[in-house]
Amino acid sequence: MTETIKITAENIYQLDLTPVDKAIEKLLNNTDLATRSDDLGFEIDFPREETDPRELSEIPEIRLWYLRLDARYPWLPYLLDWRKEFSRYAAMLVPHQFNRVEGIQYNPEALEIFVMGKIFVISDWLQEKGIFAPSKLKGMAKMLGYELDDSFFEVLQ
């Protein structure tokens, strides 16, 4: 079951990761990572003017908070409800534009660097914990348009 972490404007402005710290500590202490499901999601309460057309990923303060989050927990996407949260997480960290017809358009080179960086970081973190989970990592990469072969993960072992 997904735990929703509530992030307030104050957390954003103060670059405060306390709500995430508490949720991750609880999760890591009470979950077998090898058999876990997608556990974390975010509810961001950031007041905006009604006429503000920006998506959350276009607000610099929120993106900065996500950069801090990613610096502290670079393996966090593994713990996210990644089917719902991973694309938003990527949008916070990867340069992009919104197209009314096609939706989010990532910078292709930046997206490739982001995806491969996350695969390397998460794979190493899982190996430290004695876990081999290529199917989940392949699914995460596929969500952002990348196909990874099983032989790629053999090289990482």
Image: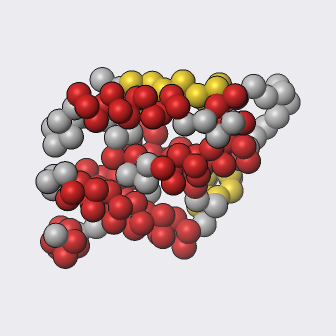
Q: Is residue 132 above or below residue 25?
A: below
Residue 32 figure quarter? top left
Residue 107 figure quarter? bottom right
Estimate the x, y position of residue 153 in percent, counting from the top left: 20, 68
Closest to the observer: 91 or 33?
A: 33
Estimate the x, y position of residue 51 in percent, counting from the top left: 85, 30
State the residue at coordinates (40%, 60%). Answer: 118
Q: Is residue 7 above or below residue 129?
A: above
Closest to the observer: 77 or 54?
A: 77
Query: Quick check: can you spot residue 42?
Result: no
| Image-based side of 95 in relation to 83, left or right | right
State the residue at coordinates (65%, 47%). Answer: 63
Question: Residue reaching furthest bottom?
Answer: 155
Estimate the x, y position of residue 36 in percent, counting from the top left: 21, 35
Q: How is the image coloured?
A: secondary structure
| Image-based side of 101 in relation to 74, left or right | right
State the residue at coordinates (58%, 49%). Answer: 68
Closest to the observer: 2 or 5?
A: 5
Q: Is residue 30 above or below residue 97?
A: above
State the residue at coordinates (79%, 37%). Answer: 53
Q: In which quadrant will I find the N terminus?
A: top left
Query: Quick check: can you spot residue 85?
Result: yes
Closest to the observer: 74 or 57?
A: 74
Q: In which quadrant will I find the C terminus?
A: bottom left
